[in-house]
Image (cartoon, rainbow, N blue to C red):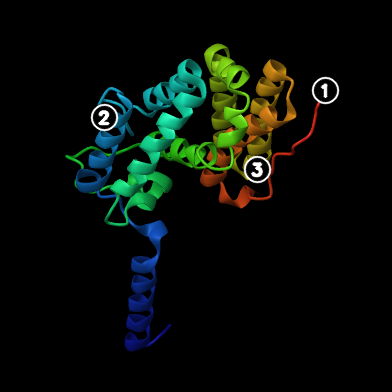
Amino acid sequence: MCSTNYCLAIFVLVGVVAAQDPRLTACNAGNSLNTCQWQFNNKTGFDQSLGVTNYQGLRSAIEKSFADYQALGLLNICEAYKEYQQCYTDGQFFACAQNPFGLLTATNNGGVQFTQDQANGYVKIWNQLDFVCGAGFSIFANAEDCGSAVFNNQTAAMRQCDNDFNVNAAADPNEACAYVEIAANCYFQLFWNACKKPEVAYWGCNYERTGTNLLYPQCSQIFCTFHERVI
């Protein structure tokens, strides 16, 4: 039992810490998220219905750019992604695009409440683009024919990797890190089978890993290796 003043002090301290913690910040959907998503879709020529509630369609449109336009498609997406980040002039990028909690507690959204699947699926896309448009850009650009062929011919297999991860991680969350590694290896194998180039397989592995690692930060010990694997 604590005194009234002591308890009040602890309550105020916790409240201040929560207010300062970006992980506990709600996304302002009306003034930030929707505006910046509209800008991204306009820049890329995507349908304006694509966004959090249709994150699967957004992913498909982005990956179709990789498939159809190869390195140029990658460049166009990355330019739009940079502008998307810069659009959040109010510091809301993390809350709206990289933190599922921010979307689950979104405000000013016309009464729409996002689901856990929508929040996770949406932020996964942007975290993957951090890799794609950063360390992974030159790897894909230097193997654009092969890399784009995977997005042309193996999308069903990639979605199966995703689905298996989602189902297994939800059913057995204590083993989430094992499933993160399995999913990353699933992508590694798809890109290895198509290209037989270790650097491209490494790209595929990281494409998946960087997305799931954001959702499961406790699995930061999972890494993709750059080596030739014959299976």
25 versus 200 height, above or below = below
Residue with the most extreme left position: 110
Please report the residue visible at 25 percent of the width from the left and 26 percent of the height from the top: 48
How packed mark 3 is, by other alpha carbons closer than 10 Å (few <14, some 14-19, many 20 or more), is many
Tell me the tag on residue 230: 1
Q: Distance from label 3 to label 2 (Cα)? A: 37 Å
Q: Is mark 1 on a helix, strand or loop?
A: loop
160 versus 204 height, above or below = above
Of callouts 3 and 2, the N-terminal one: 2
How packed mark 2 is, by other alpha carbons closer than 10 Å (few <14, some 14-19, many 20 or more), is few
Please report the residue visible at 25 percent of the width from the left and 50 percent of the height from the top: 28
Query: In the figure, residue 167 lies in which quadrant?
Result: top right
Q: What element carries label 2?
A: helix
Residue with the most extreme right position: 230
Of callouts 2 and 1, the N-terminal one: 2
61 versus 34 height, above or below = above
Judging depth in this view, the residue of 206 and 158 nearest the camera is: 206
Q: Could you tell me residue 53's position as x and y percent?
A: 32, 30
Horizontal side of residue 53 vs 191, given as left or right: left
Q: What element carries label 3?
A: helix
Disc 3 target residue: 177
Look at the image and tell me whether residue 205 can be seen: yes
Q: Distance from label 1 to label 3 (Cα)? A: 24 Å
Q: Are marks 2 and 1 in contact (CB under 8 Å)?
A: no
Residue with the most extreme top position: 153
Horizontal side of residue 147 vs 7, given as left or right: right
Nearer the viewer's eye, disc 3 or disc 2? 2
Tell me the tag on residue 42: 2
